[in-house]
Amino acid sequence: MADISSVDASLWWDSFTVLLTELENSSLSSDLPPNLAKKLKDNHAWFLDTLSRFKPPNQSSKEALNSKTLKIGSHQLSVQPHLKDKALQISSILLLDEVQSYIFVERSIKHNDAVADSMAPEFLHMMLIQYYKERQCLLKCIRWILMHAIHNGPVSEDNTMKEEARKLFHDGLESKLILFFDNLLSCSYPEQMDVELFTLWAEETLIEDNLVLDILFLAYYDSLCTCSGEMWKKFGALYKGILAGDYNLGKLAITAETQQLSYHAKVQLLLILIETLNLENVLQMVHDEVPYRKGKSTFSMTDVQEMDALVSTFNAFEMNEAGPLVLAWAVFLYLLLTLLEKDENNDLMEIDHISYVRQAFEAGSLRYCLEILECDILKDYDGPMCGYRSVLRTFISAFIASYEINLQPDDGNPTLILDILCKIYRGEESLCIQFWDKESFIDGPIRSLLCNLESEFPFRTVELVQLLSSLGEGTWPAECVYNFLNRSLGISSLFEINGDSQIVEAQQVVQVPGVQGLFIPAGTRGRVLRVVGENTALVRWEYTSSGIFVLLLHLAQEMYLDNKDEVAVTLDLLSRLVSFNTGICFAVMDISNSLQFDAVGLMNEQVEKRVWVVEIICNLIKKLPLNSGGAALMSMGIKILSIMLICSPSNVAAATLNANLFDMTLQTPVLNVGSNGLSSGSWLLSSKLARMLSIDCEQNSNDCPLAISVLDFTIQLVETGVEHDDLLALIIFSLQYILVNHEYWKYKTKHIRWKITLKVLELMKKCISSTPNYGKMGEIIRNVLFSDSSIHNTLFQIVCTTSHSLEKLHVSRVFDPMEIEGLQLAISSVLDILSVMLTKLSKDTSLNFPAFLQAVFSCTTKPVPVVTSVLSLISYFQDPAIQYEAVRFISMLFAIADCIQPFSYGITCFVPDNEIMDLRQSLSYILLEQSVSNEDLFVATVNLFTSAAHYQPSFIVAIFAPEENTKDHLSIGDAKLQKEETSPIHAVFRKPSLIDALVHYIERADDLIKSNPRILLCVLNFMIALWQGAPQYANLLESLRRHGKFWEHLANAISNIASSEISLPTSLKEKDAFNLAYAFHCQSSILGIMAYELFLQRKLFHAESTVKDAAESKEKEQNVTRTEKSKATNLHDLKGIWSSLFNDSILEKLIKSYTSYGNNSDIYNGAKVATSLFSVHVMMKLAVCDSGSLSVLLLQKIHEILAKLSIHPAFSELLSQYSQRGYSEGKELKKLILSDLYYHLQGELEGRKIGIGPFKELSQYLVESNFLGTYQHQFNEDAFTKNMFTKNVYLFDLAHLREDLRLDVWDCNNWRISKEVAEVMLRFLQDANSVMLLSSSKLSALKGLIAVLAVNHDSQGRATAGGRISDELIFTFMDNICQSFLSNVEILSSVLDASEDILNFLACEVELIFQLTRTVRKSLSLDVSLLVLKCASSGLRLLGSLKPAPSEANVIMKLLLTLLLSVLQSNSLNAHSGVVTKDNSGEVLSKISNATLGLLPILCNCVATSDHCMLSLSVMDLILRSFLTPRTWLPVLQNHLQLPVVMLKLHDRSSTSIPVIMKFFLTLARVRGGADMLYCSGFLSSVRVLFAESGEDFSTTSENLGGSCEKFVIPQDIWGLGLAVVTAMVKSLGDHSSGTAIVDSMIPYFFSEKAHFIIYSLNAPDFPSDDRDKKRPRAQRTFISLATLKETEHTLMLMCELAKHWHSWIKAIRNVDRQLREKCIHLLAFISRGSQRLGELSSRNAPLLCPPTLKEDFEISSKPSFVNSKNGWFALSPLGCVPKPKFSSFSTTPTHGQATESTDLIPKTCFSDTVALQVYRIAFLLLKFLCLQTEGAAKRAEEVGFVDLARFPELPMPEILHGLQDQAIAITTELCQANKQRVSPEIQDVCNLLMQILEMALHLELCVLQICRIRPVSGRVEDFSKEAKSLFSALEGHAFLKASRNSLKQMISCVYPGLLQAENFI
């Protein structure tokens, strides 16, 4: 077997089916696009050779199929064995070349999986159909080329179509076609074909006959080739032979379809023969009086004689089909004879053309012409019908011109001529245009005929109106007909005459018969047209009247209804005129304003002028009889009313509904029924309409069935927005009767059924979309739609058709193509409706599970479940519209099913396992092939994946499962593949995987984001959905990451779009705005994907690290390592990308692009002013009772605004002013004010501001009223709504607004000049929509950028991926954003109201600044800080002034306050760090202080708002503590701060706000003025209430220093901060009266009422047991927190401060003083003992277990130690400061034999240092309190004169004090020695604290020695001497400890006299 075989290149062809589709979709009015023009040129050879290019079987082709690969010219095919067998079988049946058969088979099964077995009869049938379809499409392509060339006409001579057509016939196409036609006429049935297929073969052969004749006809019609005499005789002979039965044309006519095709072929050949006589040219010569020999004639005299000889052989009596040809030949001869000159050959004179005419008439030639026009096959024929009718028109016109035709009632032939003319012109606009063109000489004879008919109007009305109705096809012809009738026509009537005079005169008034009230005035002269009786004649009077008016008067009279023909033609005329020309509709409705209307006296009737015509038609409809004629008339009448509804909705709707056209009655007023829905018994409809509908379908075959008219009428009523009981009943009748029952009606014309189906579905869709605009009526309609099972069953019966079933319909010959097309359109429409119904359902479907959803998800629906059938329809490639709607429906169903419990397990349960592969391959084909040819389908498909990823993960897993996991596996690209059973679709669809298809678009992201961002966006949204569900789609994500340069492609798309400058014009077209919005959303999605990936990798890295730490085996560790390498590689790529983005200017450009807001507010305001201008303009119209074409809904809105505007105080003021000034003489002042307001608003729109005054108030009221707010709708574009960063975008629904405005008809009425006002409004609204789209998309991109920055940096500002952004670059970013923010704030301050759009923008800008601030927290530039403070100040001031404040404003204020807190904290840290930098200069810091001072009044205002109170207090607290002196901030707070409001918030039961308030109060309390403010505001009473309330609300078990679990009922932060505030107040007020009052009241409170809390706070922890032999373990020790230590500190501070007030203190604590001192000594002993066994301790027996608990604790626990001491509690605290999880692996109480680790192994942290420092602060306060006690005892001893040892306070033992001394000396010595060069402020604070502890410990030791009268132990003296020596040595060179050192020496000299001198310390 050869690998490659080459065959003739001519065997290849590109599908003509596809080419024809492309040609038909191209525009006829312009030249072809280049790619399509190239295809035509490439196929020129096929067009020229036509069907002969399909070759017969060939042995070499058959052998070529044995190779693996087939090469056909430049094309290559892989030969697949299962397709080869089918091709060989088809080749033998179709007699087609084997290679071409193979090509054909492969293409045919591409989208056709109906049959898979090559032996199935269905498969052969399908192949035969597809083959002939391809042949016919080839012929249709040629026909389309010729029709396109004719359509363009001679104007475009260089047209591609014209050139191709000429070239084809220049190369000999004519002769080839004639030869092929001759062969077709002689062909016989193929012997190899089954007899069962004979009918199909016959039909297809006749279709090819028709197509060939069409092409030939078009060639002669457009003069692409000339028919010679010889060729004419050839056609004549063929025609004669066909009529005689010499050819197979008659033999093939074995069925109804083939009989029609055969008949049509004969007609085509007949018309070709008539056309090639060139009667038009002959008429032209007659018209121009050009002799025949000088004219352009194709026939010589000899040719004419020979042709005559042929015609003479036709026997019209035996072959009546030849009658028209004989008659046409007679006309040709007659005209030819008139062109002969006298001296020419007179042989033609001998031909008796009259005998030809007589023969033709006797054979019924005119009747045959009428039959041709009435033939069913021509009604929906896609061929050159206009050309065929044009030939007949020319033929009849020439006949009328040749032989004098007089249309007499008793003559049958002229009536036939009239019927023929009506059939010719009706439906052909081009022919009607030619008729009314006076330059058209061909129509001249017919125009004369029309004038003859007009002369007898209104005596003979039917013929005239019938002809005029046919001549009114199209806008301009309809206008011509109306003008012809509406002009002053003469009136003809019967009149008694005396004598033979042709001129008569009316002696008295003559009543015009049939027109009551229309008279011929006396004395009017008239001309006798003809005598119709002995003394009666038809007289044409010299009196004129409007023909239209006369016809309407006829209709208005009941007695006229007996003449059904006149009523029918009149209604038909009116229906056609108003349908084609809206201006005529207005003119007809306005005819009641004519003088003639008043003249006939109809105004005496109670009929409104504006609806007179409407009333006439309504009355006519109500009185129609119940028969087929009545049904036809009703249909036309309702159609007219439907069109009039468009022109004047409010007036016509009211008139028609009040007329009760269909005799509707209601048992109960429908709009008053309950909300539970409308039962079928609530409405009654007379059986007349139902019976009329049935009769019309069964007996009438008109173009507009009654059902269609009724449904159209109902749709128009719904569109008006009117609410009425009759309308509701009509809607429900349409849904519950027509929709449910119409399929069971009997139809005279089959395809009408599907027209009705589509129309009622259109009504259903309109009702669903209109329900939000209705009130109670909308609710009732909604309940019916969602609850009526009969409606659901009807819909499901249509849609439950699988793709396989539809494919079978195409194969079957039983179904008419029009029926199949109707079914397909119905399926598409039903799917659309079901999708819309799903969107209307609320999300909470679990509680409200309507019948509709039960039916949708039912598994018992026949023939298949709904979900199953719709999933199948996704694979129906023959109708992409069905695919699109099916995809949309399933996408919506995914979201709904997720909310419904019974179906939450997934939709895939509805898909049989064997169809999953087909569905997957169909979806893959759509992704790979449809993005260009059908973008909407592609987008919908990807959105389906996105929806599934969110709601139905099982579907994604099943569809995206690797194919190797399926049993139907096929290897991609495997030429040797063999498979026994497979669907044909598999062979073609074996494409790359779905993931590969999607990544293909990612690879093109750089190009797509500019050229077609919509496609890219939907793909990116799906990617985001995958990343959001990362745990479920881990394998898919890994597949995406494995594709090379995945991240690089995404980054390049952003980089390149950022590098290209995009200028935004002031006005954007809708498409451009969408593309820009899509592009920004693409950037948002890309950033979102990256953010998710960074977050995911961080989490995976953390999880894998944990797994690695806990790994139990080496194998696990190796697996983890491999995974880490994979993830690390991927993360490395992303890091590199981010580094490049940071280092380049890309990020800066992105930020500039995203934060530019532009003049959006101006556009918003312009739109509001434009809508106000329009509303005032409409109000002016309504003031003169002119509602125009506005919908009822829109009119109601404007009426409401007008009513409110009229009672506005400013309007009343203007009325008074205008009345006083005498404007308009006091009349119509309202109109005058509206007019002036209109011009004021117009000036405002043009830039001239309205001055302050009443008009300003009225304009502002209109702007704020926003009457078009109901036209704003949520933008539901999936690409936008599926973006995670996009909130709801509300746009103006311009389509709905245009529907309600109906601007297209404004040109036809007196609203023409108003159209510009509406168009200006629409332009502004469109600009506003564009701006909102762009703003939303930029906002989305900005949020994406913020997300990436947030994920890319941790809470400390460290970069987690990529390089860190340089501070300089960040400062540049922040500067740009701040400037943008300030400009936007300025814009916001100038607008009338704050739009949500700009507020969201401001929020994102603040958030971005905040994120950038986090990245440089340690080194934030103070210049940038100033700018941020300015932004915050401006923003808070403006947003705080908005009343009422929008929710978005509150969000921004919170963000601004948070940003302030962050920036100020940063600068506070810098200010206190001691680092001297340029930015920290005093000048800049003073600027910040000034800026913060300006913030204080704004923050005070924010405090009054509950949402911002806490943040504002936090910011103020930071400002007061860090940036301002009390002298500057205290006056501001005294003037602006509403302290009582803050005080009230202390009683708020939210425990989170109280600490913030207390911290702020603490700052205040540290200043005397602030403490006084607190005291005067009642802080003390508030804090007592707070403690009491907190005790009730916050009952929690808490730890204390003692570690015992007790019931502590006040939160620690509240208790401790409360103590701190009281302490600060006491300290600040001092001896002031307020301070004394506080002391006197608070000492008893704390140490009497709350004594147990004080004592509880002083409990000392238990030291771990040192008994190693103790076998019974101790009870579990309790953890404490840093907050507990701080609470103890606050308690001791209060005790120390109050103890200073000795007399008050000693009185109040008599009962607890001893207990307090004992607690203090015990706690001091605990601290002293801490370092005694330092080397023996471990984390298992740490003396103090204080792990981090709060967020702040964990943050500082990650920082290194700042003290770095190995002594005292700085060495002990790390043992107990390990986070709690670390303790979980071991007991906190060691048992015997447990090993202990060295304290050096546990790292010291900032947190452990903080805990140790807190311990020493407590020690300091304990010593201070005890010192105060000794001082008090000393004072008392001085007072009494002796020391009362019994009442002397308890003091610590010397050993306790020695331990503290040793710790202080050791740590201080260590720190001073380690930091000799430079000592940080933190170390200085530690050293100062320890020196004070050492001094006070010595002081207490001195007290103990003196009281106990003992001396220091000698050993202690020696030890202390050594320690002191090393301490003083270390203190050398540290100036900050000089004062402490001197004070310490004095104390040492007191305790150890002589020690200093002995050691030479002095």
Image (spheres, rainbow, N blue to C red):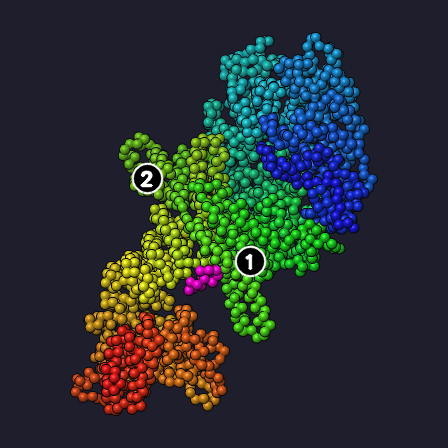
- Is 100 inside the magenta-drawn segment? no
Q: Quarter of the image holding residue 1677?
A: bottom left
Q: Could you say where residue 220 lies in the image, as x and y percent from the top left?
A: 68, 26
Q: Local crowd at mark 1 within 10 Å, few (<14), some, or many (≥20)?
A: many
The range drawn in magenta is 1352-1364
Q: Could you say where residue 1629 lies in the image, as x and y percent from the top left?
A: 22, 70
User: Majority secondary structure of the magenta segment?
Assistant: loop
Q: Is residue 412 above or below residue 933?
A: above
- SS of the residue under disc 1: helix
Of the two numbered discs 2 and 1 on the same chain, state the one appearing first in sequence: 1
Q: Amino acid at mark 2?
A: Ile
Please say whether residue 954 is visible from this viewpoint.
yes
Q: Nearer the viewer, residue 1868 or 1783?
A: 1868
State the residue at coordinates (56%, 73%).
1111
Task: Residue under label 1, please give it.
Answer: 1026
Marking on residue 1250 = 2
